[in-house]
Each structure stands twice: as C-alpha cells, then as structure tokens.
Amino acid sequence: MPTAGTTRTIAEELQHTVRELLSKAPPHCTTGTSPRQPATKPSPGLRVMDRIRALDTLRGIAALSVLLYHYTAWYDGSGAGHHTDRLWFWLPYGNFGVELFFIISGFVILMTLERVDGFYDFAVGRLSRLYPAFLTCLALTILTLYLSGFEWDRLSAAVVAANLTMVPQSFRSFPIDGSYWSLFPEIAFYTLAASVYLGARWRSVESFSITWMTLAALALLKGAASIPYRLVIVTNIPFCNLFVIGMMIYRIYTGQQRTLTYFVLTSAIAMGLFGPDWSYLPIGALHYTLLVACFALAVWAATCRRLPLLEIAPLVFLGEISYPLYLLHQQAGFAVIRKLEALGANPNVAVAIAMLLTIGTATLVSRLIEKPGRRWLRMQLKCLSTNMLSPLSRL
C-alpha cells in the first residue's frame, strides 16, 4: 500500500508532466500556467524546408493531369457528352497523377512524423490541413449536384454523413465526387505510418517498408480479389510501394540513407511490375514501372532543386491550389461541360471554360478557406487539448 510520501511524489511527478504539456500551449489559451513557445525539433540532417515548394508544384501538376484526364478521356468514355475525335487534346493516362500524389505523401508524412511531438500533434496537423478545404469543396459539390440535378437522386443523408468522414467506403457508401476515392488510401497511410512510427516506435523505416511490401507482394501474387476489400484498402496493398518510394527519397534527402535504403527504393519501384491498380487504357507492366521510376526521379530532383522550372510563378500558384483543385474539379466541372455542350458550345471551349472556372473557384477556396481554416482549426484543437489537461495541473 503506497505511503503518503509516495502519493505526494506521484502527484508531484504528474503535476510536473502536465505542466510540461501545458507549456506548449498557444499563448492565447488560458490555462493558469505561463505558456511558452516550444522549441523546433529538427530532423537529423534535414536541410532547409523551402524545397517543399517544389513538391507542392509537383502536386499541382499531378492535380492538373487528373483534371485533364477527367475532362477528356473519362468524360468521353462515360458517354456523357463530347467525343475524343472532336477534342484537340486527350489525356487517357492522366489518372496516374494520383501515383505522384502518393509518392509525395510518403516523403512529406515521414518528414512530419520526425518533427511532431506525438500522435495527437500529428493528427491535429493532418486534420487542420485537410478538413476545412474538404468540407467546403464537399458543400460546393453537393450544391452543384442540386442545381444541375445530375445524380441528385443518389444522395441521401446517410451518404452525406459518410462523406463527412472523408472515408465513406468504411461505411459501405460511395464518394460523392469520384476524386475523393484517393483520400482513403492517403488517410490509411497516415494512420498506419503514425501507429508504427509514433505508437509502436518502430523507427527503422527500411525494415518496416520491407515488411509492408513483402506482405503486399504476397497478397498481389495470391490475387487482391481474394482478399477482403476493406483489408486491401486499409493496408494499402495496391499502393504501398508508392508511399515507400517517397519515404526512401526522404531518407536520402536528409542524409539518413544506408545501402538498405537504396535496396528498398529499387524494390519499391520494381513492384510496379505488378501493374497499376486501374488504368483507363491498357498499359504494360514495364511501361508502368518506368512511369513510377520517372515520378520517383522527379520527386528526388524537386527536393534537390534540380528542376528550376518548378520555381516559376504559374507552377508555384498551381501547387498552392492543388488540393482544392483536385477536390472540386470532377463533378462541378462535368456540370459546366454538360451545360455548355447542351447549349451548343464546342467541346474544346466547354473544357477550357470548365477548367478556368474550377481553377478560379479553387483559388478562392485556397485563399479564403484552406489557409485561414487550417490555422483556425489547428488553434482550436490545440486549445481543446490544453483545456482538457488544465484541471490536472491543479493537482
């Protein structure tokens, strides 16, 4: 049975721990303690972070390629309107911009995990980064479907509620905008990476990546169709090698690479020989692998500033709006194209106007919602954590 002295010691230790946590609170949160700004925790060997702008530019290029794919090849294939022989431009492989997204995410998430103070800090950062813009784009998409009447009968309160989670597939529902499908693999990767790195404290990224890819390769050899769909998505079996590529490039970028790092990177690229998860037109396994290798090379070159073209203003701007551009473009753009073509507009003109309107709307969402919303939500979540802990400081 603990003595009074032992009890006081435990209480003092608990009070000291709580006060240490509260000392990291934002200055405007009233907690009864004297807040201070936490010191920055740099990653080992990490160089200047401004090179991430080049990765944002690559995101913008990826988002634009997906947009052009949807407005040309996918829209035509759906039978909703124009025909490819009447278009000046057609991008049937633009959907592989998503592969580039996943590689960049592998790089950025590992960098983030090395810098955050814990799982809650990581979750706050991801949620504040993604949710304000997502919620706005979801509302705009629902409004578009209502005004256009297209597929409006498919929506219900349950579908909308499932989409508010960003992972409607978890609730046997479907994304209101088809582009939202890639959010599930992204969030599944965030959860897995944070659980392994911060939860289990498995800091050997290379050994974790080997384990992950080996399990994925065995599953793909057996046939993904034989594995429960949710398990495939949660474990990111079709895309794990892409996230691993990004993580290995980050290890090289920060000077933490070993011989094993290059082996894992090569193996992850070679997993492209399994072929893509889906493709609008057939693509050979070797060609797909070469495409993945080119994406990996582009990400590495961007982090090393070997691609000065990525620093020009129009591409930097495209990178800044890439997230709302990706979220907004599909259903809203289709509605514009359908309306204009119904009025007799040339398909090329309809696509150009839809693209300009989408870019304009994405710019407004980025500047008015995404950036200020990110700061506001992060501040609120930090204060919530601080205020929940503050009663313990009085023990």
Image (cartoon, rainbow, N blue to C red):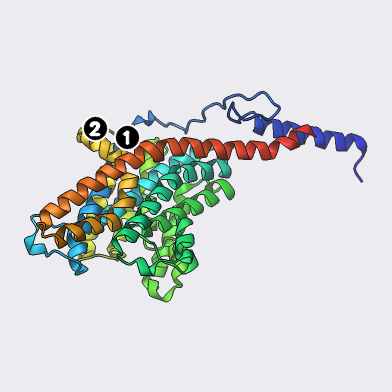
Which residue is the site of mark 1?
Answer: 53
Q: Is residue 266 left or right of residue 134?
A: left
Which residue is the site of mark 2?
Answer: 311
Residue 284 is situated, as x and y percent measured from the top left of the image, at 20, 65
299 lies above or below 335: above
Is residue 265 among the parts visible in the rendering? no
Is residue 101 among the parts visible in the rendering? yes
Q: Is residue 103 left or right of residue 115?
A: left
200 lies above or below 40: below
Q: Is residue 251 left or right of residue 77?
A: right
**Label 1 residue SS:** helix
Nearer-the-camera pick, 2 or 356 = 356
Q: Quadrant of residue 45?
A: top left
2 lies above or below 233: above
Residue 55 is situated, as x and y percent measured from the top left of the image, at 31, 40
Residue drawn 49% across the image and 66% down it = 171
Residue 226 is situated, as x and y percent measured from the top left of the image, at 42, 76
Nearer-the-camera pick, 5 or 64 = 64
**Label 2 residue SS:** helix
Of mark 2 and mark 1, the one earlier in the sequence is 1
Residue 73 is situated, as x and y percent measured from the top left of the image, at 18, 62
Q: How many labels sit on residues? A: 2
Residue drawn 7% across the image and 61% down it = 86
Nearer-the-camera pick, 148 or 268 = 148
Query: Which residue type carries mark 2?
Result: Glu
Q: Is residue 268 left or right of residue 288?
A: right
